[in-house]
Image (cartoon, rainbow, N blue to C red):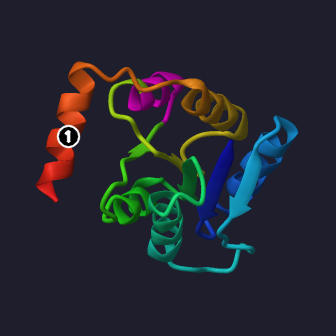
Amino acid sequence: MKIILGADHGGYSLKNAIKDHLIRNGYEIIDKGTNSSEPVDYPEYGHDVANAIVSHEGDFGIIVCGTGIGISIAANKIKGIRAALCINTTMSKLSREHNDANILALGARIIGESLAFDIVDTFLTSEFQNGRHKIRIDKIEKIR
């Protein structure tokens, strides 16, 4: 499975820790940056990851900023993206099962590294349940 990563300066450290965690677990990674803790603007990285997902460069995206809010809003501007900001494993599991989320957003200032790994692992191993959820996802897609 190929995962696209992106973060602003606030999420840079956590993104790198997640990257190492995913590589250790056999995932292929495409890192869209940022590549330092120097200040940058999160919309660029949210858009870069979102565009990579809709163009099928990878299977899922993971984006990180200080809170996860701004970068998830930016990613969700791209048609076909369902970025879910998750702060626990229940949200992560249900974002995949019920909402068919294709990007996971995390807040580096909100959760710790260990919890982030659990949320990421849950997100990547949970599957969309289809059925009544598919009808709702189709309705969301028609809004844009």
Q: Position of residue 43 (x, y in %)?
A: 44, 73
The dominant secondary structure in magenta is: helix
Q: Is residue 94 magenta?
A: yes
Crowding at mark 1 (Cα within 10 Å: few <14, some 14-19, many 20+): few
Q: Which image quadrant is residue 113 in? A: top right
Q: Which image quadrant is residue 35 in? A: bottom right
Q: Amino acid at mark 1?
A: Asp
Residue at the spot x=50%, y=57% of the render? 53
Left or right position of 136 against 20: left
Q: Is residue 30 magenta?
A: no
Q: Position of residue 82 (x, y in %)?
A: 36, 48
Q: Measured along the vertical axis of the image, is residue 14 above or below residue 86? A: below
Left or right position of 23 against 40: right
Say which element carries label 1: helix
Left or right position of 73 against 89: left
Residue at the spot x=43%, y=44% of the render? 85
Left or right position of 85 against 57: left
Q: Measured along the vertical axis of the image, is residue 9 above or below residue 72? A: below
Task: Pick the residue in front: 28 or 64.
Answer: 28
Report the residue marked by disc 1: 138
Task: Pick the residue in front: 110 or 57.
Answer: 57
Q: Position of residue 104 (x, y in %)?
A: 50, 45
Location of the C terminus (image quadrant): bottom left
Residue at the spot x=59%, y=60% of the render? 57
Residue at the limit of the structure toward the right, as seen here: 24
Q: Position of residue 75 (x, y in %)?
A: 40, 62
Q: Measured along the vertical axis of the image, is residue 74 above or below residue 128? A: below
Q: Measured along the vertical axis of the image, is residue 34 above or below residue 80? A: below
**Magenta segment boundaries in residue numbering:** 87-96
Location of the N terminus (image quadrant): top right
Residue at the spot x=65%, y=69% of the render? 32
